[in-house]
Image (cartoon, grey):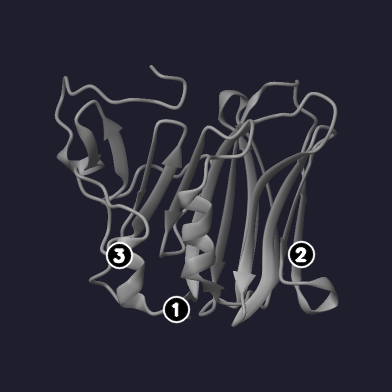
């Protein structure tokens, strides 16, 4: 549906927003907008971006969401300090697992992890980037299931897991990788709220994950 806005949810330690109509300067609030989709609504395509850092010793859990009666499985993402990210959708053999291995990074180094899925392409991708040094690795698997909007909104309504500085959700399979740029409609946080990247003007102040 080309009328949909792309980026529909954001969650960082300072703010949470969700709107299936797309994020605007005023953002959106959970869970008011979810009701009009219906309790069983699913996304057959989408992108989930997580900004985090390399754990020091133990693997870190970056996202965890459980389903409901109509879709009882889980969505889990873990990051391992030796250079591995694992994402599980569903339960056991019936689920889908993506594993992406990447060159070992220093503890505390910033990473961007992107999970992208598309039923029309019959594929799901899990990418790991270290933008500060140009590292990019990804894996791909066939057969991604549609993911309930209620499960994704659950991620956006809760406080982020330790070590997660940003969660962002799109209802489209967005471009990703070191060459990807901010496409039209990408929400950017400013001191006055969220706005689309194309609405920014030279000299406008924006807020970053580290508070800059």
Q: Which mark is residue 126?
A: none
Residue 9, image x, y percentages: 39, 52
**The N terminus appears in which quarter of the rendering?**
bottom left
Front one among 81 and 20: 20
Give the left or right position of residue 135, taking residue 98 as reference: left
Report which residue position mark 1 lands on.
41
Which residue sits at x=54%, y=65%? 151
Give the left or right position of residue 19, taking residue 72 as reference: left
Nearer to us of marks 3 and 1 is: 3
Query: Looking at the rendering, which quadrant does residue 129 occupy?
Result: top right
Whether 187 is drawn above or below 131: the answer is below
Whether 209 is drawn above or below 183: the answer is above
Nearer to us of marks 2 and 3 is: 3
Query: Looking at the rendering, which quadrant does residue 181 occupy?
Result: top left
The answer for how far apart the CA atoms under marks 2 and 1 are is 22 Å
- Looking at the rendered structure, the secondary structure element under dot 1 is loop
Front one among 197 and 52: 52
Mark nearer the N terminus (2 vs 1): 1
Which residue sits at x=44%, y=78%? 39
Residue 210, image x, y percentages: 47, 20
- Looking at the rendered structure, the secondary structure element under dot 2 is strand
Front one among 62 and 38: 38
Mark nearer the N terminus (2 vs 3): 3
Residue 153, image x, y percentages: 46, 59
Report which residue position mark 2 lands on.
97
Report which residue position mark 3 lands on.
33
Which residue sits at x=84%, y=72%? 92
The answer for how far apart the CA atoms under marks 2 and 3 are is 30 Å
Mark nearer the N terminus (3 vs 1): 3
């Amino acid at each position: 549906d080309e009328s949909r806005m792309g980026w529909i949810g954001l969650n960082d330690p300072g703010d949470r927003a969700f709107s299936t109509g797309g994020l605007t300067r005023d953002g959106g609030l959970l869970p008011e907008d979810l009701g009009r989709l219906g309790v069983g609504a699913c996304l057959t395509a989408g992108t989930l971006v997580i900004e985090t850092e390399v754990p020091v010793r133990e693997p870190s859990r970056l996202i965890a969401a459980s389903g409901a009666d109509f879709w009882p499985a889980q969505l889990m993402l873990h990051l391992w300090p030796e250079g591995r990210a694992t994402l599980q959708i569903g339960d056991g053999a019936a689920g889908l697992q993506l594993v992406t291995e990447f060159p070992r990074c220093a503890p505390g180094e910033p990473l961007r992890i992107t999970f992208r899925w598309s039923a029309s392409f019959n594929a799901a991708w899990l990418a790991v980037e270290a933008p500060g040094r140009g590292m990019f690795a990804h894996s791909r698997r066939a057969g991604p299931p549609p993911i309930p909007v209620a499960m994704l909104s659950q991620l956006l309504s809760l406080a982020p897991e330790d070590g997660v500085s940003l969660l962002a959700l799109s209802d489209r399979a967005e471009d990703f990788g070191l060459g990807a740029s901010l496409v039209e409609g990408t929400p950017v946080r400013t001191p006055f709220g969220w706005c689309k990247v194309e609405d920014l003007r030279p000299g406008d102040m924006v807020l970053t994950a580290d508070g800059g």
